[in-house]
Amino acid sequence: MSNHQKFLKLIFIFSILSCSSSKSTGNNNSSLFLFERQAKALQNNWDAIVNATDLSYDKITSWVPESGIRGRYAQFKTKLGRLTLEKIVRHKAFIKGPHQEQLNLKSLTEFGYYNPKFLEKLISKMNKLYANKRFVENFQNFYDRELQDYLRVHYQAHNFIKHNPEYKTDYLNHIEYYKKNPELGKQGLSPSYEMHNSFYHFGTDMDEDGYDVYEAYSCPSFWIRRSIDGTSELFFELLVNTLKTFDSDFIL
């Protein structure tokens, strides 16, 4: 889907939470060792990666690369991308959809259906990392600076969609309409764009609270798609575990 949702609008973001300068949590677990090694390499080279990453529209299909997931993922994937995560958890990320070896960021009428086994394994591994007090202390400043606001918007967007289940039907209807009218995509439109009015009040509220308005409009679409592929609660569990670890006051 346009906004592609974003190969790990959350999976990827949470994966970066393994950055740590402590001793490896995975000394007795080769997959966790790989996870931490790649994350540490990303952290140590972060400034160079940010400066070197091409965030042009042709590369990431986003007009606002400084917001949302696409710009972040373009930077993070240099060390921790989908294929690396699949190797770590030993399951494919998707069970259905347009994504192959490369992510398809241009499909308007298809999106990736996430693999529940992939998420269950990822949750288990992240919980082991979150139990490492030294890791949490080392990563807290980076979390506060780079991820706190984004994940807070995701948390509120989940609750927004949960209390507006009719948006799922609306979204599916928009997809069917775009299948019958492919010329709309050439005009820069998308099913997610059609949800703009539905998300207006949520986006306005988030903007007034000081959050990024683009992220406030894009995060609800992620949760709609997860309600369609059946992985919403697994993603929410991962999100809540992360907030309890790094931002506990926010969800008290």
Image (spheres, rainbow, N blue to C red):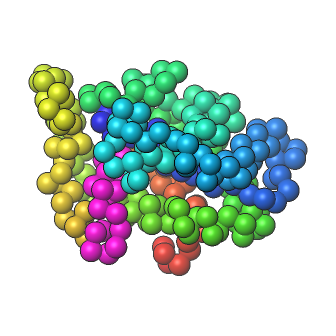
Quadrant for the N terminus in the image: top left
Is residue 229 visible from the viewing direction of this image?
no
Foreground residue among 57 and 131: 57
Residue drawn at 82 percent across, 47 percent down: 26
Is residue 140 visible from the viewing direction of this image?
yes
Where residue 51 appears, as percent x and y from the top left, is 55, 48
Where residue 247 appears, as percent x and y from the top left, is 55, 71
On screen, residue 44 versus residue 243, left or right, reads: right
The magenta stretch is 206-224
Specify whether residue 65 is painted magenta: no
Q: Quadrant of residue 67?
A: bottom left
Residue drawn at 50 percent across, 66 percent down: 148
Foreground residue among 2 and 113: 2
On screen, residue 165 versus residue 23, left or right, reads: left
Figure check: 124 above or below 131: above
Across the whole image, how many numbered discs are drawn on residues? 0
Where residue 177 appears, as percent x and y from the top left, is 13, 29
* The residue positioned farthest toward the right in the image shown: 28
Foreground residue among 140 and 222: 140
Q: Quadrant of residue 246?
A: bottom right
Specify whether residue 209 is painted magenta: yes
Residue drawn at 16 percent across, 43 percent down: 194
Query: Could you tell me what secondary structure mostly forms the magenta stretch?
Result: helix
Residue drawn at 81 percent across, 53 percent down: 25
Where residue 120 appears, as percent x and y from the top left, is 60, 43
